[in-house]
Image: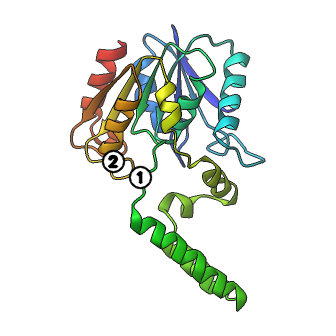
């Protein structure tokens, strides 16, 4: 797994979000390197880390554990954004960590009735078009109903997305490690109501809401975001 390492001190590992790479969390890494040894990784299938078969969440967990053992990392602090939080939420149920920070975390499904109507309508129409071998119309229909993340992903990552869009409610209830939740007030991808569910489900968790920011609070409001990080870790 490709990574960049900087700083000196207790170990911190940063796990980026979907269609991102290690660089997306540079702000956090740069802030922490004065006190910590910071590992910024490219998860398999992203950045400079290749992926030969589509992973599920457990595959990502075991890949992370191999990375930790290979680099002789012990009891790290794990910090994840969005998709990276899915991995962390499973990892901490199997392996020891000091604490975790989840930023605008994925892991709870945010689907309403119109989503299911759209999906099942798409499947029905696609079947009809397949009978008449209308591949171009099928492609146009897929582009119309698919999510932005799905449409922007390559073939391999599309398969990964299908295997990793899980509801982690049961697993979140099992997390016993100290957890800081950081959330953008105006996040439309993983809305603030999901943050409150995370906070309710994880026993030892606290929630910090970043004003005037969306799914990337470390970009939208870096000063307030770093104030939260500083107070918690520095």
Residue 165 rendering spot, x and y as whole percentages:
56, 49
The tag on residue 110 is 1
Residue at 55% across / 40% down in the picture? 21
Residue 173 rendering spot, x and y as whole percentages:
47, 29
Residue at 36% across / 29% down in the picture? 181
The tag on residue 191 is 2
On the rendered image, what quadrant is the C terminus found in? top left
Report which quarter residue 194 is drawn in. Answer: top left
Callout 2–callout 1 Cβ contact below 8 Å? yes
- 215 sits to left or right of 126: left
Q: Secondary structure at mark 2?
A: loop
Residue at 58% across / 21% down in the picture? 5
Per the model, the C-alpha gap separating discs 2 and 1 is 8 Å
Report which quarter residue 132 is drawn in. Answer: bottom right
**Extreme right residue here?**
52
The tag on residue 217 is none
Q: Nearer the viewer, residue 9 or 137?
A: 137
């Amino acid at each position: 797994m490709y990574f960049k390492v900087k700083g000196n001190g207790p170990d911190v590992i940063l796990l980026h979000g979907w269609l991102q790479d290690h660089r997306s969390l540079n702000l956090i890494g740069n802030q922490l390197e004065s006190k910590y040894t910071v590992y910024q990784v490219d998860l398999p299938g992203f950045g400079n880390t290749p992926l030969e078969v589509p992973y599920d969440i457990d595959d990502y967990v075991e890949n992370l554990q191999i990375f930790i053992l290979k680099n002789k990392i012990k009891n790290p602090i794990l910090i994840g954004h969005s998709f990276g939080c899915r991995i962390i939420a499973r990892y901490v149920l199997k392996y020891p960590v000091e604490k975790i920070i989840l930023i605008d975390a994925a892991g709870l499904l945010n689907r309403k009735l119109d989503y299911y109507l759209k999906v099942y309508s798409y499947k029905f129409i696609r079947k009809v078009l397949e009978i008449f071998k209308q591949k171009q119309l099928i492609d146009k229909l897929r582009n119309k109903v698919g999510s932005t993340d799905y449409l922007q992903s390559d073939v391999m990552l599309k398969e990964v997305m299908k295997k990793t869009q899980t509801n982690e409610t049961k697993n979140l209830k099992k997390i016993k490690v100290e957890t800081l939740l950081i959330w953008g007030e105006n996040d439309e991808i993983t809305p603030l109501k999901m943050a409150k569910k995370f906070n309710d489900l994880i026993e030892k968790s606290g929630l910090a809401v970043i004003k005037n920011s969306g799914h990337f609070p470390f970009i939208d409001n870096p000063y307030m975001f770093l104030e939260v990080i500083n107070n918690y870790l520095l």
